[in-house]
Amino acid sequence: INNSSSFRKSMSAGTAQFSKTYSKDFRETICLQMGSMKLSTPRATVRKIPLPLLLVAIVAEANSYRLCVIEETVTKHFCEIVAKSSSTELRSFAMEILTHFMPLSLSKPAIALKYGNGPMMVANMADKNESPLEVVPIDDTNAPKVTLESEEVDISHGDPQLLKILCETIQHTTQADTASATLSALHVVLEGSGHSLTGENLITVIKTLSVLSGCESSDDDVPVNRSTKQWSNVSTLAFQNLKLILDDFLEPISTSSDSPLKSTEARDAILDCCVAFGMSTHDVNSSLTATGMLWSLADRDSSPDTVDIVLSKLALLAMDSRPELRNCSVNTLFSCVVGLGDQFSDDQWQKCLDNTIFGIMKGIAFAIKEAENKKMGSIGGANDERYKVAVHHSRDSASKQWVNTQILLLRGLERVLRLFFAQLLETLSGTSGKPWFLQTWKEILRLSFDCATMTGERDTLDMRFAGVELMALCAQLSCTSGLAASATAARVGTNMEVVGGALRSVRAAVEDKAPKTDESRITNRPEVDRWRQELFDFSFDKLCAFRKHLEQNGEAESEGPYTTLDSFQTQVLTKMTGELAKLYECCKNDEMTPGPCELQLDLLIENNGGYESRFLHLLLAIADNAGNDKSSRYLNQVQRGIMSLLQAMASNSSLRAFKALATISGDYMFVRAKALASETEDEDDDYDDDDHGEIFELEAAKMVASAFKSDDLSNEAKVVVMCSVLLQYLKIYGSSEHCSNDTAKRKTSEARYDMITSVIDSGLEAIEHIESTTDDEAILDSIWNRIIATVSSLLLPPLENRYAGYAHHSKSILNIVAIVLSHLPTRKYPLTEPMLQNGADRAVDVAFECNAKDQDDGGMLYSKAAEGAVHVFLACFMGLCNKMPTCPAVSSLTNKILGETIESEDALSNNAPLKSKTRQSLAIAVCESLRTTTSQDLLVGVFPLLCRLTNVENDGLRRAAGKILGGVNLSEAISRERQRAEQADMRAREIEEENIAMLEEIEYLQAENEELQRQLAVFSESADYM
């Protein structure tokens, strides 16, 4: 109201209407005065309020500019009415009066600058009987003179007693509706004057809201149970007031010089209030929001003390009995660490990891045991629940819900290590004794190993996954190349929060890229590298301990009747295989680099204590425990992952990986799967191996062949692996000098050549590159000798299996011979000539033998064998014609085949059709080979036979001979022969002339000799006379 105006004027409009008694007129006057205060209380309700109470309100309003003088007395009186009155109307009126004066109590009115604590109005003494409430301003010139004692102007206010007393009233009230009304009024006041809350005012309000949160606390003076349902609305209203203060009136400490967060007491009160609402069981949404407020407060005040307290508060909430709240608290804790971790000191990191995170771990472990004990104790007891709700199997018990929280904790720890490993690693440098992070690292590895090796059903699967990932991550982080080598990006939070329905950034978002700490800033690099190596050793040792765990379990399971693997163990091993693949990508160029490869005739690799050797042992242990169900047509995910990882190692020139693949594959690279699966097959069975499905050993053999296609595989590694493969082949199909006593001999009908063909092709290309860059032919000659021995075993199969070999593998033999001859060095031609000649002779013999047997028995096998023998002969003879056209083997074979074809009486007869057909096929093969040769001398040498062949009755032979003759340049050949004859004649004449000259010289020498003999005789006679 306008205190400077006359009260007579404010009531003059209604004076004429007053015709009642003095008491009623007096009350009506007060009602008008209340209306000028703009209260929402209806006039009818005001008329029911006791007159003394109305007078107190009017007097307080008249002295509102110096409210601090009467504030405590008036506030206590109205607060007592609010707390204890049984009348709803009285409580509502008292609360509205308190709400009306609250802004005046929190602020300093400008009018107080003029009057201080002195009066601004005085009573109208002239008309005090007619108008007892009328006052006049002291500066009114028309007012009667009053004598006032001068007062010193003091505009300083003490602590606002109204807010303090009101909060005490709320804290001690036992009526929920009173607290609700008071909080609603407080919310209205804060909306208008919340910016005035500073210092003690803020602490008072915050502590009051904490009391009303519904969280049981031993600090409460009044034993009121506010966790009951009737106090739920009070808790909601209190939380609305807290959100209003924090969202609208609490400025960040970095942007405001008078921020309440600079006060330790105010900060602690706010954090305790958030924790109180987090622990309140009234509304889980309020609890979750309060948890997020802690993160927001840490972002606003990122000082070490505040952050440490926030983390401790979140750790407290992480042990709440409600799974949704503790899970949210765990996620919020790690998001806070991720957002502020780059500002942490070494001591803060130690507290965060050792005290906070591992403290939560210990608490969760205790809670899981306690929940399991309660579950065991409740088995067989009565179930008090009337209604049962279907819950997912992963959280249908308290222990499972605690396990889910533990999983979140492991994921969060993994997230922190990904981002801040470099910063944590730097804490190890410059320390004396045992650094704290080294012990923490060991504890992390122990925890991850325990989780990875847990036993149980589906409820433990996620925990085992988390343990496997954390254990492998430690090795990836501590290796030389670091986590970036595996190209795995870390997921981090966005540091956003919802305020009033809008998404607000509370801190710059963390990019989903590399770790936040830059390793380039590390100063003491040698010492840090030494510590990194030690951490990697610990991590790798823990992986090896996992291998021992698998081996022990494998021995125990092998004693049982079943060999298949349960699906949960398969999933764990699949996860481990995937993580090991990432680890190998990180270490393949440093810790697990294969090193230089030297040419040798076999994979002579010793198993040492190196990283690569131990890593390979781990893979083989996983493969052994992956199950090997013979009835399955496909590999399981574990086997497929192992194969892929071994292939990656082999492609990186790892001879150990090749040896492991060769050991796993056994004979599957050279023997058909059906033959190995069943030893009772007939020779004329279907030789298609594609319908046999995926076999672990067969896939290992395929991996060896496919690894040769990698560009990363060195030429030396290709040659060494090829030699090892050929040696294994020779042990199975070679001669007795290559076979050991314990090696099972296989029939050539069971052989397969697709993979060995690919190996030989890539290996020979590698040899060709090596030959062009080295002068050491000793080891290369040994390698070529093994290759030639392998081809000889192909061309000269054992007598007891020769028919099936020619019948089914002739085309493969032809391809292998062609590949070998295309890369064969010139110095090896003399060694190759007898091999090809013997192969051609054996093929001719087998072809005619099959003709004889086919006529007698009429089997399809012999017919195919005859055709295959012709193909083998073609491969051998064509190789001779192309590489060694002037060797005697070419002439002898040509004369034998073509001469017998022409001169034999059976060549074109119908008495022996099979033999005749074979002769024709062999003759055509000779002609096709002669067409490919570039030696004109060879063609001239067989020219008479070709001419005679054009006169046979068979059209195919005539055309083949005609094509060869058509390609011969006779004029050039005759001219060359004439030149050669002339040169021979000239040489003969020269030799004859030289011979004549030599005869003449001999005659001259003989004459000289005779003369010398005569002179000697003369001298001898003279000597006798003397």
Image (cartoon, rainbow, N blue to C red):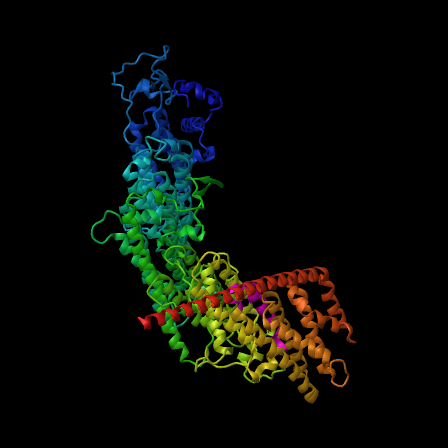
Closest to the observer, 13 or 201: 201
Closest to the observer, 390 or 186: 390
Question: Residue 306 vs residue 239: left or right?
Answer: left
Magenta part of the chain: 807-829
Question: Residue 217: x, y in percent?
Answer: 30, 50
Question: Residue 192 vs residue 149: left or right?
Answer: right
Is residue 479 magenta-colored? no
Closest to the observer, 721 or 459: 721
Question: Residue 550 vs residue 869: left or right?
Answer: left
Is residue 812 magenta-colored? yes
Residue at the front extreme, as displayed = 1025
- Quarter of the figure with the N terminus: top left
Name above or below for residue 773 compared with residue 852: above
| Secondary structure character of the magenta stretch overall | helix
Please give the name of the residue rendered at 42% of the width and 63% of the height, measured from the top-left corner.
599
Question: Residue 664 vs residue 86: left or right?
Answer: right
- Quarter of the figure with the C terminus: bottom left
Question: Residue 19: x, y in percent?
Answer: 47, 25
Asked where in the image residue 367 lies, by quadrant, the reply is: bottom left
Q: Total of numbered circles in the picture? A: 0
Question: Residue 664: x, y in percent?
Answer: 46, 72
Residue at the left extreme, as displayed = 433
Asked where in the image residue 957 lies, by quadrant, the reply is: bottom right
Residue at the bottom extreme, as displayed = 856
Question: Does residue 866 appear in this view?
Answer: yes
Question: Residue 913: x, y in percent?
Answer: 74, 83
Question: Does residue 406 appear in this view?
Answer: no
Closest to the observer, 791 or 732: 791
